[in-house]
């Protein structure tokens, strides 16, 4: 049996870490017969200790995290490959290395991603250079979308033959239940209200409701206080590691007619795939890689194009259009399961 080590910045067995990606990927590897070793490089925890002695030296924190990871890899013994999730640390020399990313540091910098705003320019540059070194060393640079792949090749100079678009899996498996496609029932799911462009969605919904007075919009996630208004339902935060909340999320997906997420930045939002599994079409953003996930089963809008968002929601308010795109979404969802992602990564690593 092949043996792969997952190198992650936190606890890769925790379903709440990085949208559940490490845990679900590990389970998928085990499911296809590849043994998984969990190792943790925890620069966040190490960095707090280092700051007391070294100040805000992210490079030192990264080196310390790499050393901690090296000790763990020595303890777990021989593995056939290491899959690195994230670039906050460097994996020590040894087995074949593959990376898995949904966005590069240089893409995040161009888009002014909130993740980088607390860092100085020198820290961001150092992080990008560390990521470049990681990509150069890796046998396979696996990414979730063609959008991310283009950056690895163009921004980092990596040979296209070593860059592999493997996709991303979903964390929920709602049922594609029979449903009435009228009235239109829009659904928004997102914790970061500002980055997910919730305000623009609310404004667009008001215009759509003027044309479709029976339309509804359900908002899931943490959001600022919004005054009650006709057709808008506030669900609050729902967390997949809580069974009742997980069941409620599936219920909402199974009863909606369109997911709308016009984010300012969206590398590869898994919720589009979860909607697709329920047979629900999506409206997503042109900024990022979700076009790969949505394909021809929904619509993409520029997050700054308010009229375009209204037009897309109006189009998806038509029951025949929503039903047709929902059927296409359900078919497309079969390409995006964690076992299929694990198989693609295993193939490029020859495991």
Image: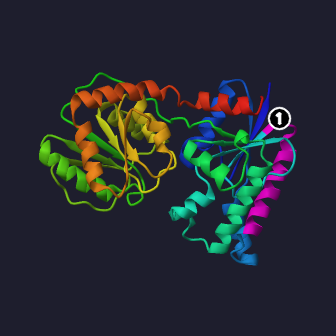
Determine whether the residue tagged by mark 1 lies in a helix, strand or loop: loop
Q: Visible in this render: residue 125?
A: yes
Q: In which quarter of the image is residue 60?
A: bottom right
User: Where 315 falls versus 156 (above or below)?
Assistant: above
Magenta stretch containing residue 78, yes or no?
yes
Which residue is located at x 37 percent, y 52 percent?
302
Residue sitting at x 67%, y 73%: 122
Q: State the predominant SS element of the stretch in magenta.
A: helix
Specify whether residue 265 is painted magenta: no
Asked if residue 188 lies left or right of residue 271, the reply is left
> Can you say which quadrant of the picture contains the N terminus?
top right
- The residue shown at (40%, 35%) is 275
Q: Is 253 displayed left or right of 208 in the figure?
A: right
Give whichever of 152, 101 is nearer the camera: 152
Q: Where is residue 280 drawn, in percent x and y?
A: 35, 32
> Which quadrant does the C terminus fall into?
top right
| Structural crowding at the residue carrying mark 1, measured as other residues with C-alpha within 10 Å and reported as few (<14), some (14–19) or many (≥20) | some
Residue 16 in view of the camera: no
173 to 101, vertically: above or below: above
Relative to 53, does residue 6 appear above or below in the rendering?
Answer: above
Identify which residue is drawn at 73% across, 28% down: 34
Q: Where is residue 14 in the image (x, y as percent from the top left)?
A: 60, 44
Q: Mark 1 points at which residue?
A: 80
View extreme (top): residue: 178
Residue 55 locus on image (x, y percent): 71, 78
Q: Out of 15 and 211, give the one closest to the viewer.
A: 211
Colouring chosen for the image of the structure:
rainbow
- Magenta segment range? 59-81
Left or right of 13, for residue 238: left
Closest to the observer: 266 or 171?
266
The answer to whether residue 123 is left or right of residue 306 is: right
């Amino acid at each position: 049996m092949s043996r792969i080590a997952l190198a992650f910045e936190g606890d890769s067995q925790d379903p709440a870490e990085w949208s559940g990606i490490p845990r679900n990927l590990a389970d998928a590897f085990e499911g296809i017969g590849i043994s998984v070793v969990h190792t943790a490089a925890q620069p966040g925890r190490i960095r707090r200790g280092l700051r007391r002695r070294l100040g805000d030296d992210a490079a030192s924190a990264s080196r310390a995290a790499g050393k901690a990871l090296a000790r763990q890899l020595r303890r777990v013994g021989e593995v056939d490959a290491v899959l690195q999730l994230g670039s906050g640390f460097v994996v020590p020399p040894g087995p074949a290395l593959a990376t898995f990313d949904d966005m590069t540091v240089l893409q995040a910098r161009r888009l002014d991603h909130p993740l980088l705003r607390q860092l100085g320019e020198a820290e961001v540059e150092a992080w990008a250079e560390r990521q470049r070194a990681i990509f150069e060393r890796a046998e396979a640079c696996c990414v979730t979308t063609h959008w991310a792949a283009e950056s690895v090749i163009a921004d980092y100079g990596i040979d296209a033959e070593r860059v592999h678009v493997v996709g991303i899996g979903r964390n929920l498996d709602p049922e594609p239940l029979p449903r009435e496609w009228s009235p239109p029932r829009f659904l928004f799911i997102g914790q970061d209200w500002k980055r997910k462009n919730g305000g623009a969605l609310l404004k667009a919904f008001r215009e759509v409701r003027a044309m479709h007075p029976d339309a509804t919009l359900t908002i899931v996630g943490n959001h600022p206080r919004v005054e009650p208004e006709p057709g808008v339902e506030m669900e609050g935060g729902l967390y997949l590691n809580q069974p009742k909340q997980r069941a409620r999320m599936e219920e909402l997906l199974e009863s909606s007619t369109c997911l709308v997420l016009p984010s300012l930045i969206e590398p590869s939002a898994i919720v589009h795939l979860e909607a697709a599994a329920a047979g629900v079409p999506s409206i997503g953003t042109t900024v990022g890689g979700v076009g790969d996930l949505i394909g021809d089963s929904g619509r993409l809008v520029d997050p700054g194009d308010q009229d375009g968002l209204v037009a897309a929601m109006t189009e998806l308010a038509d029951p025949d259009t929503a039903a047709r795109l929902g059927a296409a979404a359900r078919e497309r969802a079969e390409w995006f399961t964690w076992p299929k992602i694990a198989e693609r990564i295993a193939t490029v690593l020859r495991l």
